Amino acid sequence: MSRFRRRPHVAATAALVAFAAMACAAEPSSRPASRPAVPDRRPAPDAPEEAEGEAPVKTKAGITLSRETTYITGPLNEDGTVNYVEYLNRKYGKGVTPENNAAVLMLKALGPGVVNKDSRGEFLKRLGMDELREDGAYFLDLADYLRALPAEQAAELPQPAEKSAVWQAELNQAMSELWQREDHPTIAAWLAANAKPLKLFGNAAQRNRLFFPLVPAHDPPIVFCTLLPSLGGIRDAAKALSARAMLRAGGGDWDGAMADLQTVRRLGWLFSQDGILLHRLVGLAVDSIGMDATQLLLTTGVLAEGEVHALFEDLRAVPAHGDIREPLAHERFNGLDAIMILARGDGEQFVKLMGALAEIPEVGEPKRVDYRVVVAKAIIEVAKAEDIAWDAAIRAHNTWFDAVAEPYPDGMSTQGAAKTEDSLEALQAAKWRVRRDPAKWGAELTRKRNETAGERQQRIGRKIGEFMSVHFIAQLGRAASLQKGREARRYALLAAAALAVHRAETGEFPKKLAELTPKLLEQVPADPFTGEPLIYRRTEDGYVLYSVGPDLEDDGGVENEDDREEGDLVVRVPPDVADEDE
């Protein structure tokens, strides 16, 4: 029945920014007991600049507290460096309670296994939660459910439970068509077994806040080394809710189907509040799953007039998503923290941090020392022998970061995207220079030049700042592109719902999107990639509606199934679908 093509989700992109918590879980660094405490000069959570007229303060580690260097000026660690972990916890935990925080119900649905044992007690304490039972009725993804089946029940399956790819394909099919229990009996049984945790996800979606506290794995705290919960189960739950929506719709339970899809969309919205980029990417994946299923119902002619109106109102009721530029700005804290590790003289931790970023060799490739570790060791030797201008390192990192993450004052414009692309290309070129010959890069760092001691300190600092930028920034541009893609699909989906309402009321689709305003839409939705209206063309009793997508090329409404960075982002109602309800 389905003419809908599954879109690859953004789950894989989370690996680009995932925090290497376990690699950072080292013994706390030793600090002299005589080190004096530094007064906490923290600003308001949403005001990173130092107070007007207040002179910048030099920390004991040789770093100046200011907007140009540390970006925020508090709260502070005992050595006077900035505690970015606590800053994020205070900012995003403000006003959060166990009663309004969706994270509490999500964890009750997922179980204790998603939180690292070493941090679980502190994590749950910060959420105001009691310990979670190990044997609770928690959500099981499809693979775990199949593995847990009794042997006699597993033997009756049409495919062995171990063939995960086969079962995943069946789940994708169940998410892509209206179906009944006899069509996918194993998927139906899996959904029934997860009824209790799925209800908890539905309740979580009705809350208005989402906050997962950051629990440090190192002292002083390091953002890159915080122990975050494993939230892959959220994506699996969204798939389950999507599949159940299609099952309910296939049985005529439209209210149930709408409720499940609303839950998925609201879960995606909740994650758009989080200050951690990795969590935002989880939200983008969840939102994509919900939009796929919603688009399916809208474009296959299965909804009656009342159901079309109800879905349109549901889509309008979802609040605006948070701007991804905010967590992008916080990603700079990883590089700033790394420089402060060096300034403190904690060379061992710095090498571990760089090792956590190491690329995993392909199957069959010999194991080798990653070039980042080679450079990290070279930097440590320089830091032992030289006086380094750490402020210069931080300013260089901030300069690169501003070029990549903050050229979007008008809402991620095409011009801003081009500036970001140029900066990213420059960073990638710098990365390949280091990667080709890390020993040469290390030698160049300290090569004797005709320069004063001060100039030498500044130059080495800038080179170190560039190295941090290469490895903490280079992939962030894609996150902004993913956000724009999500916005483009959201606008197109709302327009598609308005088109369906117009057709239900008038018997035909409009010739232009402008006919939907102002009764259904306040204005014609704009393509976030171009700033121009979404492209809409009537076809024979149908239409094609699309954004030009990240490549900024108008491909005439043609999608690229293999690469979502190429091709258009399309909603299409072909003639035969448009005629199904006539």
Image (spheres, grey):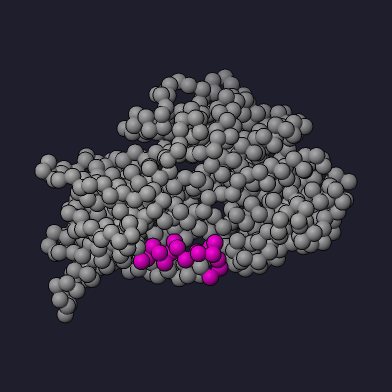
The one of 254 and 16 positioned closer to us in this rendering: 254
Question: Where in the figure is residue 246, as x and y percent of width and height?
Answer: 70, 36
For image coordinates 51% across by 68% down, the residue present is: 416
Q: Residue furthest front?
A: 53
Give coordinates of residue 241: x percent, y percent: 62, 35
Q: Can residue 360 be seen by looking at this rendering?
A: yes
Q: Which residues are magenta?
A: 399-415
Horizontally, is 155 left or right of 70 in the view?
right
From what the image shows, is residue 92 above or below residue 330?
Answer: above
Q: Is residue 411 magenta?
A: yes
Residue 19 visible in the shown view: no
Picture residue at 74% right of the left edge, 31% below the top: 253
Q: Answer with the quarter of the image where residue 37 lies.
A: top left
Residue at (59, 40) in percent of width and height: 266
Q: Is residue 146 magenta?
A: no
| Front residue of this view, candidates 383 and 563 | 383
Image quarter in which the N terminus is found: top right
Residue 349 coordinates in the image, percent (x, y): 23, 48
* In front of the other: 412 or 377: 412
At 23% from the left and 62% from the top, the residue drawn is 390
Please provide percent x and percent y for residue 399.
Answer: 36, 66
Res 206 → quadrant: top right
